Image: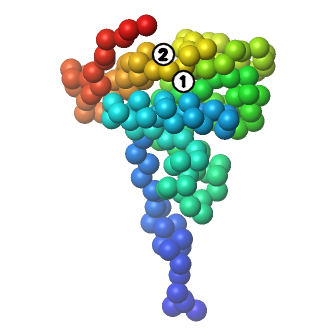
């Protein structure tokens, strides 16, 4: 009985296995805005800022894992959360849960507004305490501002890491043309 074969899941549980998640930014959004999220991810990743968003990273790295567990781990592992803010996102239970988790984990949150905001609810109230990047009606025109703000926050989190001397920021800011 003790010699029976065990699956990999048992081995991972015994060794406290945690898959390594290598990303800097978690992007929270409502699914109909995935094209904007892809563009945001592209411009950030062009600057060597690693992004995580569903379903791209769920499909490529988390087959068979519960959706909410994968998102929980991704938020826990990131340094910055960018929420693509629209009325639909404000009303989304998933976005509300993701932002609540980010706040519980004391993540730095950047609201990136890509639609006219008319919805008023608790999530809006919590996010009003943050400085927003108002990218409506042309989100692409504010990508460089978003990139620089993400870099600033990433540099701040790197200064707090043990062993960092704080003299050389990893991310260099760019000139912004607004």
Q: Quadrant of residue 44?
A: top left
* Residue 107 visible at all: no
Crowd around label 1: few <14 · some 14–19 · many ≥20 (10 Å) = many
How many numbered discs sit on the rendered protein?
Answer: 2
Image quarter hosting the N terminus: bottom right
Q: Position of residue 158 (x, y in %)?
A: 33, 28
Pointers 2 and 1 in contact (CB under 8 A)? Answer: no
- Give the x, y percent position of residue 57: 51, 49
Residue nearest the viewer, comparing 99 with 105? 99
Q: Position of residue 70 (x, y in %)?
A: 58, 50
Q: Nearer the viewer, mark 2 or mark 1?
A: 2
Q: Is residue 71 above or below residue 167?
A: below
> Disc 1 designates what residue?
109
Task: Identify residue for label 2.
Answer: 141
Upstream in the sequence, badge 2 or badge 1?
Answer: 1
Q: Residue at x 41, y 30 (%)?
A: 43
Residue drawn at x 42%, y 52% is 20
- Pick the residue in front: 74 or 176: 176
Please identify the quarter of the rendering in which residue 47 is found: top left
67 in relation to 16, above or below? above
Residue at left offset 54%, top offset 19% = 139
Does the image show residue 8? yes
Secondary structure of the residue carrying numbered label 1: strand
Q: Residue at x 61, y 14 (%)?
A: 137
Image disc number at residue 60? none
Question: Marks 2 and 1, how far apart in space?
Answer: 20 Å
């Amino acid at each position: 009985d003790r010699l029976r074969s065990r699956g990999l899941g048992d081995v991972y549980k015994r060794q406290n296995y945690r898959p390594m998640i290598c990303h800097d930014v978690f992007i929270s959004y409502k699914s109909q805005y995935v094209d904007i999220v892809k563009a945001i991810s592209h411009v950030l990743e062009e600057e060597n800022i690693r992004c995580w968003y569903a379903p791209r990273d769920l499909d490529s790295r988390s087959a068979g894992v519960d959706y909410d567990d994968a998102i929980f781990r991704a938020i826990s592992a990131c340094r910055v959360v960018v929420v693509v803010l629209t009325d639909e996102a404000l009303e989304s239970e998933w976005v509300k849960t993701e932002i609540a988790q980010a706040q519980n984990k004391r993540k730095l949150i950047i609201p990136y507004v890509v639609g006219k905001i008319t919805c008023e609810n608790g999530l809006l109230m919590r996010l009003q305490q943050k400085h927003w990047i108002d990218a409506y009606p042309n989100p692409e025109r504010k990508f460089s501002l978003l990139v620089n703000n993400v870099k600033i926050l990433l540099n701040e989190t790197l200064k707090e890491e043990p062993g960092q001397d704080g003299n050389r920021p990893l991310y260099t800011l760019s000139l912004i043309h607004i």
